[in-house]
């Protein structure tokens, strides 16, 4: 089961605070590799807090933990904190402003059983290969 | 104990931090928010890279001199290198960076282009009726956060400047002020508001236009952007009748459809409001010295971000010359990344190009960007291990302090930039 949703990305203080502990840490992954959804939307695709979901946009896909929105309601909108997970889904264009669209990206969210959520460095290497 | 230290995380630049030292190490931090405290406490056990270069797919540890040589070679060989980042450098380092960009004929851009670049475009069109945070603290009785969530991004903004502090004309602090939050989500900032206005995602432009329409005496439909007509009218009345209003805006306006048009409309609303009362507007600049980057670049090249120096003179055309433009179109043939992490924060296609070209990373700790870098040079933490000038979000320059020494052998951004620049000059002279 899947839903079509509007993706917003942005800062959360746990993302900011764990980023300062290091982007290679598990804490950072836990804070930023999450897809925050309203309970109504979670019900529609049959996921609970902590289950894994696959989020797909025209530009990429990424596996994340589903999390009940802390700042809701916003049915039909999902939120992913700033970071490599969110950005793997974003469009390349800047509408002639230099600014990519970090908010309002159409995505599909579906449940995946026991999906693997990659840590930041793993994710970067798996998508982009790796200099080193 | 070192007192009155400046926090180098966000554009709030809190300058009242106390840092307790023991044996030259940071032991405790007082007054900072969670993020700021982690910034200081993280310094001691940061995952610091060693200088390294990648050759034939193999990473090897090298001396700092070798890493600097390799970085200089990459820059000299490139036709259109991108020099990007700068948000956590001091102004002194940024000045050196501009000189280097000019020397190698590159494109220099900062994190501005992925946060308030659109705001800059709008300000250039319609102006910027703004003020300092001190004035907000002393005078504001109506505070609006629009598309900004300071409880997460600038945690002490409300307690130091906008809502809670007692001010000269606002002796009772929060009781003398009203807070309105406009956002697509009921954020933690919205939960504190006297009035929360939930705008449909991506419909901020429409709501701003509706406010202006009412303000200018015209009728509007029964509902605009998910907000009822009577609520819009009430909002306008509130704005018109305050003594000193301030509209803080964030990424919820700059990143959503409309981008600079949204900001243009918000500034125009504030200009319209000044026919009735005193109203001001301010961008919630995010990262530490991102404001300083704009200042330095403006006084050295004439433009605030996205400056292309490949022709030997500055050209400015966001949409063509910003970091994500030259990356997504595959134009940059080398990247020099300092004090930022574009691999974590740029859209996929830009990062794919970064992975293809020679990539130099100058950062205090391992990040997703260092994972793809061909040259990594460790730098000291600005504001903790390095002193210098930074600009607060209201463009007030503040001297940031040094509280501890960097680890043995770790250079400052300024030293690294200077040494690369000298090496570039030597290579070019050959
Ligand atoms: S609000 Fe910003 S500047 Fe102040 S302590 Fe927190 S992170 Fe640092």
Image (spheres, coloured by chain):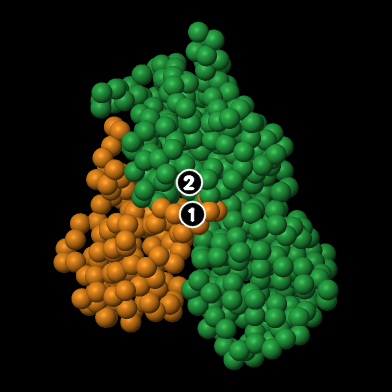
Q: Which residue is mark 1?
A: A94
Q: Position of residue A68 (x, y in %)?
A: 35, 73
Chain of the residue under label 1: A
Q: Which chain is orange?
A: A
Q: Position of residue A69 (x, y in %)?
A: 39, 72
Q: Which residue is mark 2?
A: B325
In this orientation, which residue lies closer to the viewer: A4 or B133? A4
- Between the residue at mark 1 and the residue at mark 2, the CA separation in whole angstroms equals 7 Å
Q: Secondary structure at mark 2?
A: helix
For residue B49, what is the image quadrant? top left
> Quick check: can you spot residue B45?
no
In this orientation, which residue lies closer to the viewer: B57 or B124? B124
Q: Is residue B147 above or below residue A28?
A: below
Disc 1: CA contacts within 10 A as few (<14), some (14-19) or many (>=20): many
Chain of the residue under label 2: B
In this orientation, which residue lies closer to the viewer: B414 or B330? B330
Q: Secondary structure at mark 1?
A: loop
Left or right of B387? Residue A127 is: left
Residues at circles 1 and 2 in contact by the CB criterion of under 8 Å: yes
* Residue that extends furthest to the front in the rendered view of this protein: B311
Is label 1 on the same chain as label 2? no
Q: Is residue B405 above or below residue B89?
A: above
- Residue at 79% x, 80% y is B241
The N terminus of chain B appears in which quarter of the rendering?
A: top right
Q: Is residue B424 above or below residue B229?
A: above
Left or right of B152? Residue B328 is: left
Q: Colour of chain B?
A: green
- Residue at 42% x, 32% y is B333
- Residue at 49% x, 43% y is B323
- Residue at 28% x, 69% y is A109
């Amino acid at each position: 089961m899947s839903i079509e949703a509007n993706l917003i990305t942005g800062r959360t203080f746990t993302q900011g605070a764990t980023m300062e502990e290091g982007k290679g840490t598990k804490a950072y992954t836990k804070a930023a590799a999450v897809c925050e959804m309203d309970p109504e939307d979670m019900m529609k695709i049959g996921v609970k807090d902590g289950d894994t979901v696959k989020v797909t946009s025209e530009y990429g896909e990424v596996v994340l933990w589903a999390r009940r929105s802390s700042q809701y309601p916003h049915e039909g909108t999902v939120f992913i904190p700033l970071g490599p997970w969110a950005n793997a889904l974003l469009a390349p264009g800047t509408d002639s402003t230099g600014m990519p669209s970090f908010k309002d990206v159409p995505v599909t969210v579906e449940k995946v059983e026991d999906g693997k959520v990659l840590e930041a460095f793993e994710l970067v290497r798996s998508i982009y290969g790796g200099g080193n | 104990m070192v007192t009155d230290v400046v926090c180098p995380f966000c554009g709030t630049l809190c300058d009242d931090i106390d840092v307790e030292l023991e044996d030259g190490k940071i032991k405790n931090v007082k007054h900072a928010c969670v993020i700021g405290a982690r910034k200081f406490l993280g310094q001691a056990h940061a995952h610091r890279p060693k200088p390294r270069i990648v050759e034939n797919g193999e990473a090897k540890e090298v001396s700092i001199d070798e890493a600097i040589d390799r970085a200089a070679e990459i820059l000299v060989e490139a036709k259109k290198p991108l020099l990007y980042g700068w948000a956590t450098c001091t102004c002194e380092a940024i000045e050196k960076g501009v000189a280097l960009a000019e020397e190698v004929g590159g494109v220099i851009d900062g994190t501005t282009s992925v946060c308030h670049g659109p705001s800059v475009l709008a300000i250039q069109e319609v102006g910027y009726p703004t003020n300092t945070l001190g004035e907000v603290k002393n005078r504001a009785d109506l505070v609006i956060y629009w598309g900004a969530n300071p409880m997460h991004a600038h945690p002490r903004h409300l307690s130091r400047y906008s809502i809670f502090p007692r001010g000269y004309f606002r002796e009772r602090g929060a009781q003398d002020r009203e807070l309105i939050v406009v956002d697509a989500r009921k954020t933690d900032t919205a939960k504190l508001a006297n009035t929360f206005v939930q705008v449909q995602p991506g419909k901020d432009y429409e709501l701003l236009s509706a406010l202006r329409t009412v303000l200018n005496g015209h009728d509007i439909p029964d509902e605009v952007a998910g907000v009822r007509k009577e609520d819009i009218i009430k909002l306008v009345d509130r704005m018109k009748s305050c003594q000193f209003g301030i509209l803080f805006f964030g990424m919820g306006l700059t990143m959503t459809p409309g981008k600079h048009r949204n900001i243009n409309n918000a500034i125009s609303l504030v200009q319209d409001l000044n026919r009735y009362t005193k109203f001001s507007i301010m961008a919630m600049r995010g990262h530490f010295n991102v404001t300083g980057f704009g200042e330095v670049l403006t006084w050295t090249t004439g433009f605030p971000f996205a400056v292309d120096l490949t022709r030997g003179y500055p050209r400015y055309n966001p949409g063509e010359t910003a970091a994500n433009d030259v990356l997504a179109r595959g134009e940059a043939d080398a990247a020099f990344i300092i004090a930022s992490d574009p691999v974590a924060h740029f859209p996929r296609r830009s990062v794919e190009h970064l992975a293809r070209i020679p990539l130099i990373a100058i950062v205090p700790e391992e990040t997703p960007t260092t994972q793809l870098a061909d040259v990594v040079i460790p730098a000291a933490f600005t504001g903790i291990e390095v002193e210098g000038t930074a600009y607060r979000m209201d463009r007030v320059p503040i001297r940031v302090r040094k509280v501890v020494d960097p680890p043995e052998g770790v250079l400052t951004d300024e030293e690294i930039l200077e040494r690369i620049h000298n090496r570039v000059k030597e290579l070019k002279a050959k």
